[in-house]
Image (cartoon, rainbow, N blue to C red):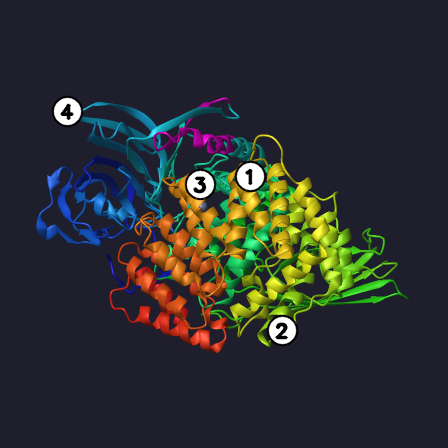
Amino acid sequence: MRTDTGQIVHLADYRPTDFVLERVDLTFELDPTNTKVDARLIFHRREGVDLSAPLVLDGDELTLSGLLLDQNEVPAAQYDVTPESLTIRDLPAESPFEITVTTYINPEANSQLMGLYRTNGIYCTQCEAEGFRRISYFPDRPDVLAPYTITIIGDKAANPVMLSNGNFLGGAGYDEGRAFAAWFDPHPKPSYLFALVAGDLGVVEDTFVTMSEREVTLKIYVEHGKEARAAYAMDALKRSMKWDEERFGREYDLDIFMIVAVSDFNMGAMENKGLNVFNDKYVLADPEIATDQDYANIEAIIAHEYFHNWTGNRITCRDWFQLCLKEGLTVYRDHEFSADQRSRAVKRIAEVRHLKSEQFPEDAGPLAHPVRPTKYREINNFYTTTVYEKGSEVTRMIATLLGRDDFKAGMDLYFERHDGQAVTVEDFVKSFEDASGRDLTQFSLWYHQAGTPLVTVSSDYDQASGTFKLSLEQMIPATPGQTAKEPMHIPLSFALILDNGSPAVPTKVAGGEVTGDVLHLTERRQSFTFTGVSSRPVLSLNRSFSAPINLHLDQTPADLAHIARHDTDLFARWQALTDLALPNLMHAARDARDGKEITCDPSFVAALLEAAGDETLEPAFRAQALTLPSEADIARELGGNNDPDAIHAGRDAILSEIAKAGTKTFLRLFEDMKVDGAFTPDAASAGKRSLRNTALSYLTYAEGTPARAAAAFASADNMTDLAQALAVLAHRFPDAPETTNALATFLARFDGNALVVDKWFSTQATIPGAGALARVRALMENPRFIATNPNRVRSLIGTFAFGNPTGFNRADGEGYRFLAEQILAIDPRNPQLAARILTSMRSWRSLEPQRADHARAALTTIEQTPTLSTDVRDIVERMLK
Ligand code: ARG
Ligand code: ZN
């Protein structure tokens, strides 16, 4: 393991390389424990670079076994080498020269899953961000682009499949028992997009005809016997390819596009040029093993990685500070894709729920950083929800500010100007400025200022003059390293809704810019006055969540109920129901803590049940409306001194109230939403299942027995219903014999299918209450729990820490001590995984003092361990700062 070197990388120190890489030629002689890598690299000195400048190549845990310069051995005096770098001096002044580096690496021993490693007998690579340097000494940075030729030599019987980027050149027998395959990728790319896969895999094939009538071969590689489970991923891929042509004018650019599913993977998936590598969780699906959520995730991630071909690969990042240039933009693209494939409003609600529960806490805690950071110690720790999801929201705001046509013109200009380049966020923004003529200087602060802006709004209506006045104030909270903030350009979509539900159409507006239904808040304090408003309107603000902000808008429950009933923006209707729910949930948490009786505003319950029963609304929306803000959401709203047990108890009491008041509605929905016939994963059927299962959950609150859920479990004919029934049983009646039976039945039925057993782990890891920890510890002893497999670790330990507020935040601090122990065990094997799971403690400072003390102590134990990886050291030190 590479332990911490403590070096911080600064954006301000960026400078181009001294040598330009022209071509890369790699030969791999595969061996499970001793793979030989020959890297032939053609360079030339960049114009104007001093003759004394050496060539410095990056490495990570490498040993050099051979070094040639133009085919001649380099004398020892001409270079310096360590496991982390290779420096060669006295290189030719002008002519290109060839460096050949030979290294031997051990894929079998690579437990970090970065570089070349083995998973289930398959050779596989992961190079983003800095994994290529674990394969060979190389200028391993995203602004070094070259075409690659790859030759793979390997045992013929063990490796019938040998893949790399680009187009297949050929392959054949080699010598006794060995075979070779050669690939060429003509598109210049950085090393982080390199990939190699070899082994014995099954394949599903299809074709796609592009907009210019080129036929592209599509292949998805999976374990033998699982081919049928790749059908949905293939379908999603073809829909993604079509959509990117229609919506963004982007055509695929190689003869073949391949996806490989592997079972040991640190993240979701990786967009290597022409050869995407996926966590098998995001490829494999059929009705028996995959939930509707699994299907939706597969669709989104297949699209995401495919879309990277243009936003990431053809146009890549100049340096890793620009990560949001590809990730934020590509998330925006996959969000739009899913919105077009499914219900836009429901998709938006899910995005905002995710943003608020994951990104807002990050932005409000010790790990807060700008979408475009200016320094990092470990780049792997910046694959964050701020870079991805807030980065996507920033792109969405550009689209909102510019409008559809100018946004499209800006994207087109970006593709035209920067194809084949490694660029910056500034280049991206400039394309939109040039295409639209709009100045985005102030807007760009969204990239540079961390923290979720708080916008406080008050309104005033004057009947006599028919004017409606809106006063807004923005405040951006201090974040680590950024105390003083400038006011931002915040686009707020709005409507003024009249008594009869129709929108007011003001004749005039003063005080600032309004374009269409978007109000541009640009000052710290700003008032907008609307004239020609004949009666008092209800303000609906930040519709569709046009800006990722916290909004304080004092609205009466009656006004919120009016929006929930009348807004033409479905998202705003959901938002209004949430705004009605939150004060009740916060109140309930306080009352639970004080041992008081918990009450609930009947008008809130009425509004909720009205939406639930409204047949004009799609079922998926009604299910979202009925799903209360999570315990984490309530904690965030409460802001500090949090007691997770009280939040849970309060929320539970409110759920019971709703269940009692709505029993009739829920009984009807449970019957009406039954989906007949064979399972299909389409959004409409998924929506009905979702509403039915939500009703089931409420009914168990009303009925207080596991009977209905046990019956639902017994009669389920698809994984969505089965897993939901199991979760209701386990979470509501953990000790009932029905639950014990269901858990045993589930395991027996799916034993051997690791992805489904993960659901069995995570369902139990999220059973609320202090008993959860003992359960998790016992499950770790289960032979199906494999400590080296990231999916197993995430589904049990990760889910417990991230998704079980009462179990993890036990008042005695045992949950934190457990996590510290696990982090220290995982870190030496897989630092990225350890660091990611540790971020589950990012909100520890908002706990009540006793728990916060326990949390600090656990973090301190980690911090004081001398052998931490850079990844974990970086996270733990920022969290304690
Ligand atoms: N680029 C990949 C994606 O599509 C993720 C890579 C994550 N890499 C890492 N070192 N965490 O999102
Ligand atoms: Zn991505």
- Up-down: is 398 above or below 340? below
User: Measured from the top left, where is residue 618 in percent x and y?
Assistant: 69, 42
Secondary structure under the numbered disc 2 in the rendered image: helix
Q: Which residues are magenta?
A: 213-238
Residue to which mark 2 is pinned: 591
Residue to which mark 4 is pinned: 175
Q: Nearer the viewer, mark 1 or mark 2?
A: 1
Q: Nearer the viewer, mark 3 or mark 2?
A: 2
Residue furthest to the front in view is 737
Q: CA distance from mark 1 to mark 4?
A: 57 Å
Q: CA distance from mark 4 to mark 2?
A: 77 Å
The image quadrant that residue 260 belongs to is top left
- Looking at marks 4 and 2 on the same chain, the residue that comes earlier in the sequence is marked by 4
Q: Nearer the viewer, mark 1 or mark 4?
A: 1
Q: Is residue 228 magenta?
A: yes
Q: CA distance from mark 1 to mark 3?
A: 27 Å
Q: CA distance from mark 4 to mark 3?
A: 38 Å
Which of these two is toward me, 489 or 627?
627
Residue to which mark 3 is pinned: 282
Which of these two is toward me, 654 or 56?
654
Q: Nearer the viewer, mark 4 or mark 3?
A: 3
- Up-down: is 393 above or below 598? above
User: Tag 3: residue type?
Assistant: Tyr
- Looking at marks 1 and 3 on the same chain, the residue that comes earlier in the sequence is marked by 3
Residue to which mark 1 is pinned: 715
